[in-house]
Image (cartoon, rainbow, N blue to C red):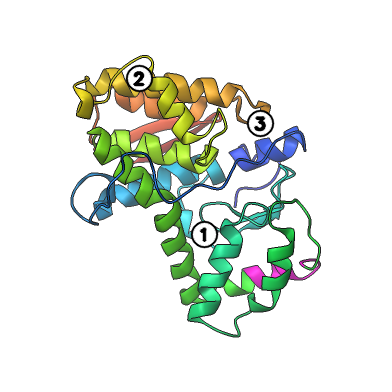
Amino acid sequence: MPTPHIRTSRRTLLAFLGASVVAAPLLTTRFADAAPVAAGAGGLDDPAKKEIAMQLVSSAENSSLDWKAQYKYIEDIGDGRGYTAGIIGFCSGTGDMLDLVELYTDREPGNALAGYLPALREVDGTDSHDGLDPDYPKDWAEAAGDGAFQQAQNDERDRVYFGPAVAQGRADGVGTLGQFTYYDAVVMHGDGSDPTSFRSIRKRALNQAKPPAQGGDEVTWLNAFLDARVWAMKQEEAHSDTSRVDTAQRVFLDQGNLNLDTPLDWKVYGDSFHIG
């Protein structure tokens, strides 16, 4: 992880801005109009493109392209979601961390985190650490060395976040970049009924343009979606730095790089990144 005094990732920004942040609702596994998508069928779930997506998100979430180093990450960033941890920011207060530990325990009974399941059920929906402190962060880091826990993190990321975002992108007729813009929005905002959730962002964009599946132009649609995303980010102080859109996704779109072809150069929160 980058050293704390220079860390400019979203997590550090949230921690700095404090507890006025309101937790986003947990993402559902179904999007409006989305259909199941087969892995490797092209688009963002092509293995090479998926790796790029993981690095792009990690650049914003962790100020690093090394997303696999984040399996062991855990801290309370003061955003009202309790502990935030792992490769996608699973939270003890929003249910996805509970689902993850349940899956891990189904696969590996007696693991280092299994004993925390009662506490995780109790704190779900809150920012409480009751029953988790003082050893939960240490035990999470220990579990992160287990390949089964790493795979569980991968699988829950794909089931709850990545897969549904790609499926909705396909349903809307957008390519690799468009699917990534959906995925990054889902990671930050979750999916629910509140005005800044993914589905609300998409609905807002539909007031301005149509996706290709409805006869619209892809670039016009993605610009409308990113405009709606920026609006949503600015509604919450902790998300008000919109550089992960302005100096990353919008750059790729302005270049006409709808397939997220390398090389890629972008900035997030002032940090420069490159994938060759």
Mark 2 vs mark 1, CA separation in Å: 32 Å
1 vs 3, front mark: 3
Residue shown at 36% from the left, 24% from the top: 251
Mark closer to the chain start, 2 or 1: 1
Give the residue number, with chain letter if any, for mark 2: 223
Query: Type of residue at label 3?
Result: Ala
Residue flagged by tag 2: what amino acid is it? Asn
Q: Which residue is drawn at 35% across and 51% down?
A: 163
> Is 152 situated above or below 229?
below
Residue 120: x and y in percent read 69, 65
Q: How far apart are marks 2 and 3 (CA)?
A: 23 Å
Side of 76 relative to 182 (left or right): right
Q: What residue type is labelled 1?
A: Ala
| Disc assigned to residue 69 | 1
- Relative image position of residue 67 (x, y in whole percent): 47, 54
Q: How crowded is mark 3: few (under 14 residues within 10 Å), some or many (20 or more)?
A: many
Q: The residue tagged with tag 2: helix, strand or loop?
A: helix
Whether residue 133 is in magenta: the answer is: yes
- The image shows a total of numbered marks equal to 3
Q: Which of marks 2 and 3 is nearer the N terminus?
A: 2
